[in-house]
Image (cartoon, grey):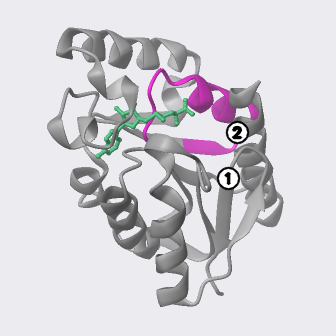
Amino acid sequence: MRKQKLTTSVVELLTKLRDEHPGEQIRAVEIGVWKGTSSRYFLEQIPELRLIMIDPWAAMQEYLDSGDKTAKRSQDEFDAIAELARRNTEDYADRRLVIRKTSAEAAKLFGPESMHLVFIDGNHGPKFVAQDLRLWWPKIKPRGILCGHDYGGRRCNAGVKPAVDQWAAETGQTLEFLPDKVFWTRKAA
Ligand SMILES: C[S@@+](CC[C@H](N)C(=O)[O-])C[C@H]1O[C@@H](n2cnc3c(N)ncnc32)[C@H](O)[C@@H]1O
């Protein structure tokens, strides 16, 4: 149910972009993929979508420090989950690109204003959310959308809101909200 609301919210944003760019490919990034179930839904719902799926699937101290219980998996388990994410999106292999790196490493691979949408759902520690906002905002095209999950979340997600609020105050961006703690904002033309 939770998953359903999150994916529906992001699909609403992708649909908006698709309708604004008739006949064009919509380029989007998902930062933090886990099992690829959201990725699959996005690809299924939006045939025009070209999705870049970024996740290190790695047992890393910096992820453990975020307090997310999924970070406690062994490297063997992460390897199996990475494989599952590929399998879950295999039907759309021609429209998805899996990049097994941290979002900071992957950001180096893309030029400015190259994406219609960036969805931030990786390491929810405040330092990493701030880093994702800083590194990926320039990658978004004019009139493109930045969005993310767990705004206003509690416990291990409690750092998302302060990081996003601070970024919005610094950049002057207005935040909007959708069901299941999704925030979003649009770049000026
Ligand atoms: C909340 S889950 C993602 C859920 C997924 N978006 C969904 O809707 O099913 C968080 C994911 O972020 C990944 N992750 C952790 N640190 C990351 C980083 N620095 N860059 C990108 N992804 C990261 C984890 O491996 C994990 O798969």
The residue that disc 2 covers is: 6
Give left or right: position of 106 versus 40. Answer: left
Classed neighbour count for the residue bearing mark 2: other residues with Cα under 10 Å, few (<14), some (14–19), many (≥20): many
Q: Position of residue 50 (x, y in %)?
A: 56, 44
The amino acid type, in three-letter code, at marker 1 is Val
Q: Quadrant of ligand 1?
A: top left
In the rendered structure, are the residues bearing label 1 and label 2 in contact, judged by CB atoms less than 8 Å apart?
Answer: yes
Please state the extent of the stretch shown in magenta in the rendering: 31-50
Q: Is residue 47 visible to us here?
A: no
Q: Position of residue 172 (x, y in %)?
A: 58, 90
Image vertical order of residue 123 relative to residue 89, above or below: below
Mark 1, ligand 1, within 8 Å: the answer is: no
Q: Nearer the viewer, residue 25 or 6?
A: 6
Image vertical order of residue 163 relative to residue 153, above or below: below
The residue that disc 1 covers is: 182
Q: Residue at x 47, y 12 (%)?
A: 87
Q: Check if residue 84 falls in the magenta segment.
A: no
Q: Position of residue 148 (x, y in %)?
A: 57, 54
* Label number found at residue 78: none
Secondary structure of residue under mark 1: strand
Q: Nearer the viewer, residue 2 or 134?
A: 2
